[in-house]
Amino acid sequence: MANGGSGQALSEQEQLARRQAVRDLMPKTPYLAWLGVVIERWEPDSVTLRLPFRPELTNDGQHYHGGVIAAVIDTAGAAAAWSNHDFNKGARASTVSLSIQYASAAKSSDLLCHAKVLRRAKELTFADILAVDDRGAVVAHALETYRIAT
C-alpha cells in the first residue's frame, strides 16, 4: 500500500513530506541529473523546470535536439502530477500519452518548461506544458496524461 501497509490514510504532513521527497529526488535521477534539469518552481499542480543550455544537448551546437525538449516536457508534466498527488492512491507511475507541437527552435538558450495540472481523475492526471526559451519565445506546447496508481 502507498501508506506503508498500515491501512491508515496518510496525514497531510506525511503527504507533504512525500511530495517534497519526490521534488528532491527527481533532479537527482541519473538521466535528469545528466541532462542538468533544475526545478525552478514547485507548487501544488504547477511547476517550472529549467534546462541550462549545453551544446552537447543540441543537433548543431546551438539548437536543442527535439528529443531533449520532449524529455524535459515529459518530466515537467510528471512533476506537476506529483506536486499535489495523494499518496493514498498509490505511487507507481508512468506517462500514458504525450502530444507535443514544436513551434520554434531554442537557439543557445536555457529551456524553461511550465507545467500545470488541468484535471485529476482517479489514476490519471492531465497536464498542459509550455516550453519557452530564456527570452520567453514559445518553443513547444504539449498535453500529457500521466498515471499514478497502486
Image (cartoon, helix red, strand yellow):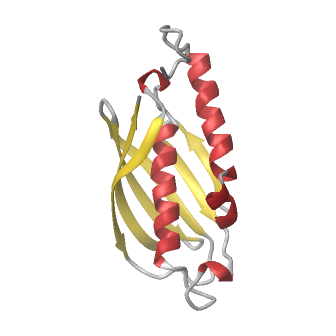
Can you say whether 25 is above or below 87 in the image? Answer: below
Q: Position of residue 19 (x, y in %)?
A: 58, 32
Q: Position of residue 62 (x, y in %)?
A: 61, 87
Query: 49 left or right of 28?
Result: left
Can you say whether 71 is above or below 97 in the image? Answer: below
Front residue of this view, candidates 85 and 106: 85
Name of the residue lying farthest toward the bottom:
60
Q: Quadrant of residue 119?
A: top left
Q: Quadrant of residue 147?
A: top left
Marker count (numbered) = 0
Q: Position of residue 49 (x, y in %)?
A: 58, 56
Q: Quadrant of residue 23?
A: top right
Which residue is found at the position 41% from the left and 70% from the top? 140
Q: From where the camera sits, is residue 10 visible?
A: yes
Q: Position of residue 96 (x, y in %)?
A: 33, 50
Which residue is found at the position 68% from the left and 77% from the top? 54
Can you say whether 145 is above or below 142 in the image? Answer: above
Which residue is found at the position 38% from the left and 77% from the top? 103
Which residue is found at the position 52% from the left and 62% from the top? 72
Query: 7 left or right of 50?
Result: left
Can you say whether 46 is above or below 97 in the image? Answer: above
Quadrant the C terminus occupies: top left
Q: From where the camera sits, is residue 137 visible?
A: no
